[in-house]
Image: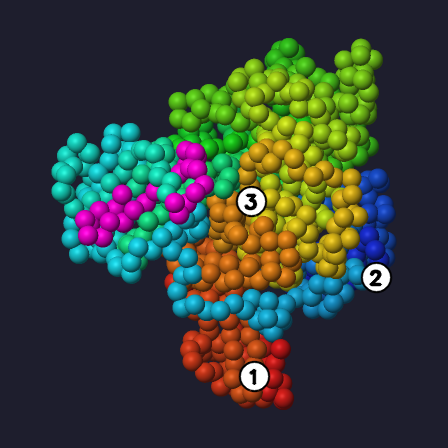
């Protein structure tokens, strides 16, 4: 085969993928790949071609990965597992040539189940000998049209016990119905601690010129207000120029936040502020306990200015938690600096103050480290190099080239610009360098560095930062993500030299902009068995440095903690990095760091792990509530094959579920098992009988949403998965709702529903339009609908969003206004639009039955 033939096949080979059955077997599903040659160049069994594709489930798990390959003589092909999610489909001698219009259907099994289009990856590609690899065009792009519909229960259910089905319009109508208030339900989001409407009057800032008056220490906050208040013109002046009787003034100052008889809780938070609108004086006063508090008062004022008129109110406000965070993974798929800045801008709008920046993982290293150039020249690029000497493997559908989201990194200057942007918005950036697991990109980069120095016979420099032994990793157990060679070796001194080098360089990047406070080392999902062949680890045990093999992880964590403490930094880790042998927390006293932050994420209810958040808090760790069942924004909004997302923790997480999360009572959030079966109180108690009651409540310091990016390849998708769940997260992290302390379940749910009605109306009538103006492509939920008699009723999950319908199969669309008459037999298409009307949700279909009543 020559290059022209390969190019022709890549452009004309039609690939289809179909999930046939998830239900028949318990731990595998049945799928098929259909190859159809639509071109003139035959696809022959000769030539040693191979199709590379990413598949997040192990193919033929009864054979792979223990064997090198599985031959399927029936089809004349074999499957091989390369590493991680990368597989090949290659011809055997028995492969029958595919002439033009010939097809081959290959049926195979894969591990677990697949119930969503987004489970499959784009950019399958074909190679042959020394030819340039080419992406197979039928699999290219984000539409994933090569995947055939999940159109039967056997394809959209995970197993026979799965209670989930895609929502029908009727189910969605019942689930999402709340009263349409015709306006935002809350004056500002997130809800202030205390708000008093002094009268029904307003100050109109558009009629006359207003000015901002601020002290020197608040010049940054004043400039921010001036810059962001696009609807009105505000001059900026010093407080020294303020006259006693001057009006039409926005006054910013630092001072004690008044606690009056209405608001009895003391305002000792530096984030506290008081905003008072003085109607007769035409003055708006923002007093903050610190510059941070003033900044949050400014954000509240900007929200009020969306209507050009500021209501006559007094607001006393301070946050529920000091830690209000968002985690962003840019390692699985890279997202550029502009996307990060946009996220920071929105976080600031909603008074969130921590960006947990997941910069490294198996699939990519995303931050330039001076002196370790291979981390970015090799570790930040994914492409077709099976030896991984010039780049790492093309995981997650990134394809053979370097022009996709699989490749990219932040230069030191980029990172500093992100820090500057965050610092101006009082957001702390917490960098995460994930280790010892999830480190394939770093390991291969340091091996490339090793080879570079070995070529000039500088063995000492070559070994300086090596992260693994040179072992036969093909026979070593893989990680959860099917990786081999992804764990740093805790027995090598060079591992800790590497850690110290990285900590030192990251700290230096922060130094003059936002001094680094917390270094997050990850610590999650480590495949410990990978160390069993390590001579270096054996030596640690033989010398008595480590008590036993089971203590290697604890040894690594303590060494990293010592390095981090040496640089006067606090330590951050995912909860499993701080749990000894999966049972009890490592003694807090073993860490010299002033604080150790534990991010509690493992709470699949039937696993019995939910209570570890409290165990860690009681053990002295500062706990950030990051529970996967409610706060993992990589999960889909609905249990529908067309919704993007993973679903290992729960089948779906919509905005309302995040809004309903009660961080002060973790077990009160237990709702359903993974299969959708409702959990009883007895179920919850049985699953968590060994867990602690929270005693050290002060050690739960906040909440964080997580976006893992395995499936998130574009900036639009990034926005859609985060928003508006982030707004619900911000609400819960800033404001504790009264219903959270209600023990009676019926009354609790009634309180949640009433509060959600106000919040969802605020989204639909105000907040989502603010996001539209910023270019944030938030998720638009499909509408719910039902027919009663001859009338169509359509609703959005967020009242106020435009709704449209079509009775001619989408040729024309009409707005849902007033009574919409339909007749039996009609097939109606319905969709919801963004607040600005420029984007739309998935289109759903409703058929009007002969009875005229639809559910």
Left or right of 273? Residue 756 is: right
Q: Is residue 265 magenta?
A: yes
Q: Nearer the viewer, residue 573 or 249?
A: 249
- Say which label, 3 or 2, has the lower sequence index: 2
Q: Earlier in the sequence, mark 3 or mark 1?
A: 3
Q: Is residue 745 above or below residue 567?
A: below
Q: Residue furthest front?
A: 261
Given residues 236 and 825, the one toward you in this image is 236
Q: Measuring from the top left, give residue 839's x and y in whole percent.
A: 44, 63
Disc 3 + disc 1, Cβ < 8 Å: no
Q: Which residue is mark 2?
A: 24
For residue 398, side relative to residue 610 (left or right): left
Q: Earlier in the sequence, mark 2 or mark 1?
A: 2
Q: Position of residue 123 (x, y in %)?
A: 61, 50
Residue at (78% x, 17% y) in the render: 546
Camera-side mark, 3 or 2: 3
Residue to which mark 3 is pinned: 705
Which region shows up in magenta?
261-285
Residue under pointer 1: 788
State the residue at coordinates (29%, 61%). Answer: 200
Q: Is residue 456 left or right of residue 98?
A: left
């Amino acid at each position: 085969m020559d290059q022209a033939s390969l190019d022709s096949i890549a452009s004309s080979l039609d690939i289809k993928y179909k999930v046939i059955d998830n239900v028949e077997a318990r731990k595998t599903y049945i799928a098929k790949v259909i190859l159809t040659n639509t071109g003139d160049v035959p696809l022959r069994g000769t030539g040693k071609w191979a199709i590379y594709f990413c598949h997040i489930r192990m193919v033929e798990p009864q054979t792979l990965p223990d064997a090198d390959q599985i031959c399927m003589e029936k089809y004349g092909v074999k499957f091989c597992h390369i590493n991680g999610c990368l597989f090949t489909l290659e011809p055997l001698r028995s492969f029958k040539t595919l002439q033009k219009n010939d097809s081959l259907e290959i049926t195979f099994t894969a591990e677990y189940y697949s119930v969503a289009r987004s489970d499959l990856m784009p950019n399958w590609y074909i190679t042959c000998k020394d030819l340039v690899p080419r992406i197979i065009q039928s699999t290219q792009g984000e539409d994933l049209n090569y995947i055939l519909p999940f159109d039967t229960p056997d394809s959209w259910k995970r197993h026979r016990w799965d209670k989930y089905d895609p929502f029908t319009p009727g189910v969605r109508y019942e689930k999402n119905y709340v009263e349409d208030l015709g306006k935002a339900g809350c004056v500002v989001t997130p809800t202030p601690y205390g708000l008093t409407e002094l009268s029904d009057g307003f100050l109109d800032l558009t009629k006359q010129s207003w000015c901002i008056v601020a002290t020197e220490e608040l010049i940054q906050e004043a400039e921010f207000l001036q810059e962001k208040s696009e609807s009105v013109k505000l001059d900026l002046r010093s407080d020294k120029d303020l006259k006693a009787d001057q009006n039409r003034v926005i006054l910013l100052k630092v001072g004690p936040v008044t606690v009056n008889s209405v608001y009895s809780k003391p305002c000792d938070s530096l984030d506290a502020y008081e905003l008072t609108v003085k109607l007769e004086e035409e003055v708006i006063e923002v007093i903050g306990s610190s510059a941070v508090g003033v900044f949050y008062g400014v954000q509240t004022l900007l929200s009020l200015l969306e209507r050009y008129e500021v209501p006559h109110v007094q607001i006393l406000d301070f946050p529920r938690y000091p830690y209000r965070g968002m985690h962003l993974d840019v390692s699985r798929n890279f997202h550029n600096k502009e996307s990060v800045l946009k996220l920071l801008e929105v976080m600031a709008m909603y008074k969130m103050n921590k960006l947990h920046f997941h910069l490294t993982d198996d699939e990519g290293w995303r931050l330039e480290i001076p002196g370790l150039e291979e981390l970015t020249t090799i570790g930040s690029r994914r492409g077709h190099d099976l030896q991984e000497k010039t780049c790492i493997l093309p995981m997650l559908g990134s394809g053979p080239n370097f022009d996709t989201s699989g490749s990219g990194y932040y230069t030191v200057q980029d990172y500093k610009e992100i820090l500057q942007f965050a610092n101006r918005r009082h957001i702390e950036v917490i960098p995460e360098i994930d280790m010892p697991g999830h480190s394939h990109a770093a390991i291969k980069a340091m091996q490339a560095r090793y080879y570079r120095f070995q070529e000039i016979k500088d063995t000492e420099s070559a070994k300086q930062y090596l992260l693994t032994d040179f072992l036969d990793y093909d026979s070593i157990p893989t990680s959860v993500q099917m990786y081999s060679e992804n764990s740093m070796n805790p027995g090598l001194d060079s591992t800790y030299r590497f850690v110290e080098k990285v900590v030192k360089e990251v700290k230096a990047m922060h130094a003059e902009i936002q001094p680094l406070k917390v270094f997050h080392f990850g610590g999650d999902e480590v495949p410990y068995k990978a160390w069993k062949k390590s001579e270096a680890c054996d030596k640690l045990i033989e010398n008595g440095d480590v008590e036993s093999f089971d203590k290697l992880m604890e040894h690594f964590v303590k060494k990293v903690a010592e390095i981090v403490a040496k640089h006067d930094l606090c330590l951050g880790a995912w909860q499993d990095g701080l749990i000894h042998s999966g049972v009890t927390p490592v003694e807090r006293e073993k860490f010299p760091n002033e604080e150790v932050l534990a991010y509690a994420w493992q709470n699949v209810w039937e696993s019995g792990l939910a209570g570890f958040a409290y165990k860690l808090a009681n053990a002295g760790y500062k706990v950030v509530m990051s529970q996967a069942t409610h706060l993992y924004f990589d999960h889909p909004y609905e249990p529908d094959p067309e919704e993007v997302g993973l679903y290992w923790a729960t089948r779906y997480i919509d905005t309302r579920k995040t809004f309903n999360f009660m961080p002060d009572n973790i077990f009160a959030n237990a709702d359903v098992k993974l299969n959708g079966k409702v959990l009883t109180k007895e179920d919850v108690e049985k699953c968590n009988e060994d867990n602690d009651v929270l005693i050290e409540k002060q050690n739960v310091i906040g909440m964080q949403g997580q976006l893992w990016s395995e499936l998130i390849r574009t900036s639009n998708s990034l926005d859609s998965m985060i928003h508006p769940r982030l707004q619900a997260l911000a609400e819960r992290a800033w404001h504790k709702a009264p219903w959270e302390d209600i023990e009676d379940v019926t009354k609790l749910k009634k309180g949640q529903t009433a509060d959600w009605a106000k919040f969802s109306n605020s989204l639909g009538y105000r907040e989502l339009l603010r996001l539209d103006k910023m270019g944030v492509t938030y998720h638009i939920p499909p509408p719910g609908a039902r027919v009663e008699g001859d009338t169509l009723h359509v609703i959005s999950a967020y009242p106020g969003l435009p709704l449209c319908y079509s009775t001619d199969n989408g040729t024309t669309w009409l707005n849902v206004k007033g009574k919409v008459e339909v007749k039996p037999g009609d097939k109606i298409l319905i969709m919801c639009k963004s607040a600005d009307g420029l984007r739309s949700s998935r289109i759903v279909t409703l058929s009007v039955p002969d009875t005229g009543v639809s559910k």
